Image (tube, rainbow, N blue to C red):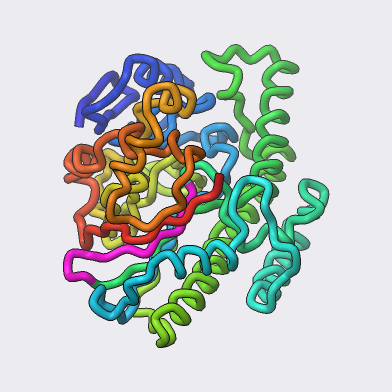
């Protein structure tokens, strides 16, 4: 850990100057308490740094949560060992791709039976929260159980003992994005109306106790729950497809589901604060968490150590070193193929910007996080599914 200034603690050994400047600007806001914690995977984000933990007194910055509210990971440990898996891995990849809509604008054509109770639960939660999700996305019910694109993925992985894990990464999809964008605009409008000077317009905030703040937190919590249930729905479909592939129903030995773009009210350093984790997971003592690398590199099942200076947090992944456009200019399809040797995946140049070399080395990120989490399992992918 490095103390950059009184209000910024840094765990990232790989940190470019622009990201550092962005984090310093955020930490300068007067309601940050006690300090901003920069995780090992930190990289430049919109308004606030991805890979930062931002505790605030009496306010929340919607852009410090981000536009993919509730994005996170889910993993299930199965009863299978690698030796029990069929050699044909392409068939299970294609089966998963048929069962789960991939890519940013791809949604379910019909609502499947497993999704109905979850949709009903979300409808009831929205009613209690006093809003209609359809006002943001008319097809929100068809978004549950869909993956998205970018760094979202579904994987079949093996741990250090060759036990089979099912692992996926996704969030609150289009409806969560629309909710986030709306409240980011509301905060910006209020800042403009009240002549509030900010180091970055995207750091506009909502003040606790106001109607705008209350509306955001109600809808934020709904979107966080949508994201959690979205992952549960997809995992149920993956479990079904993997069971059919192996010829034996999957028996779950463990299930972990955790957010990494979210806000919670927590007690830290003697005060009740809103902790926004933008690209960070909660790592209180005993908390189980998931930290993926990138396609082609290791992922980790971890347990929180409860480091108080980190505000009980840890990194959420490897963190980008190259922007998507820079990765496309720098790397080739052939380099992606070399990085994915031994892993079943869809061979396309659409994934060049997700090449492992575009990310920080996950081994270094985990070394930087040694006082934040302990590693329970190290996973390696054998099947990868992504959306364009």
Asked if the magenta segment contains residue 156, the reply would be: yes
In the figure, is residue 358 to the left or right of 14?
Answer: right
- Residue 90 vertical position relative to residue 189 in the rendered view, above or below: below
The front one of 103 and 203 is 103
In the figure, is residue 361 to the left or right of 172?
Answer: left
Q: Quadrant of residue 146?
A: bottom right
The front one of 115 and 335 is 335
The stretch in magenta equals 152-162
Q: Quadrant of residue 34?
A: top left
Look at 24% across and 37% down and name the residue there.
361
Asked if the magenta segment contains residue 17, the reply would be: no
Look at 67% across and 52% down and name the residue there.
106
Look at 23% across and 46% down and name the residue there.
372
Q: Work out which quarter of the rendered image holds the C terminus and state it.
A: top right
Count every numbered label the image shows and give the total: 0
Residue 15: x percent and y percent?
29, 23
* Residue at the farthest bottom position: 248
Residue 167: x percent and y percent?
40, 62
The front one of 37 and 98 is 98
Q: Quadrant of residue 16?
A: top left
- Residue 55 vertical position relative to residue 16 in the rendered view, above or below: below
- Residue 256 vertical position relative to residue 289 in the rendered view, above or below: below
In the figure, is residue 349 to the left or right of 165?
Answer: right
Look at 38% across and 67% down and name the residue there.
89
Q: Work out which quarter of the rendered image holds the N terminus and state it.
A: top left
Q: Is residue 303 visible?
A: no
Residue 331: x percent and y percent?
37, 28
The front one of 174 and 135 is 174
Residue 156: x percent and y percent?
37, 64
Q: Is residue 62 visible?
A: yes
């Amino acid at each position: 850990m490095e103390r950059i200034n009184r209000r910024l603690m840094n765990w990232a050994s790989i940190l470019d100057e622009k990201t550092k400047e962005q984090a310093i600007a955020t930490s300068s806001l007067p309601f940050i308490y006690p300090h901003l914690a920069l995780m090992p995977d930190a990289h430049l984000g919109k308004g606030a740094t991805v890979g930062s933990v931002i505790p605030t007194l009496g306010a929340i910055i919607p852009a410090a949560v981000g536009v993919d509210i509730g994005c996170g990971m889910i993993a299930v440990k199965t009863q299978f060992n690698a030796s029990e898996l069929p050699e044909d891995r392409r068939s299970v990849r294609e089966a998963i791709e048929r069962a789960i809509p991939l890519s940013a604008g791809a949604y379910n054509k019909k609502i499947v039976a497993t999704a109905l109770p979850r949709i009903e639960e979300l409808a009831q939660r929205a009613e209690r929260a006093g809003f209609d999700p359809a006002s943001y996305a008319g097809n929100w019910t068809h978004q549950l159980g869909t993956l998205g694109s970018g760094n979202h993925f579904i994987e079949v992985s093996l741990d250090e003992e060759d036990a089979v894990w099912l692992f996926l990464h996704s969030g609150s999809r289009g409806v969560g994005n629309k909710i986030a964008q709306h409240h980011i605009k509301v905060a910006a409008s209020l800042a403009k109306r009240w002549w509030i000077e900010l180091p970055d317009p995207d750091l506009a905030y909502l003040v606790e106790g106001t109607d705008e703040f209350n509306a955001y937190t109600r809808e934020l919590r709904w979107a966080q729950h949508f994201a959690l249930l979205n992952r549960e729905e997809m995992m149920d479909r993956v479990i079904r497809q993997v069971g059919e592939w192996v010829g034996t129903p999957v028996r779950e030995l463990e299930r972990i589901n955790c957010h990494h773009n979210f806000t919670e009210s927590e007690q830290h350093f003697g005060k009740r604060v809103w902790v926004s984790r933008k690209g960070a997971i909660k790592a209180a003592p005993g908390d189980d968490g998931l930290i993926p690398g990138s396609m082609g590199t290791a992922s980790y099942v971890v347990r929180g150590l409860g480091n108080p200076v980190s505000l009980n947090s840890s990194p959420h992944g490897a963190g980008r070193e190259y922007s998507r456009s820079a990765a496309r200019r720098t790397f080739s399809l052939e380099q992606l193929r070399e990085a994915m040797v031994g892993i079943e995946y869809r061979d396309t140049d659409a994934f060049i910007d997700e090449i492992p070399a575009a990310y920080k080395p996950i081994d270094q990120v985990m070394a930087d996080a040694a006082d934040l989490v302990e590693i329970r399992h190290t996973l390696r992918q054998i099947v990868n599914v992504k959306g364009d």
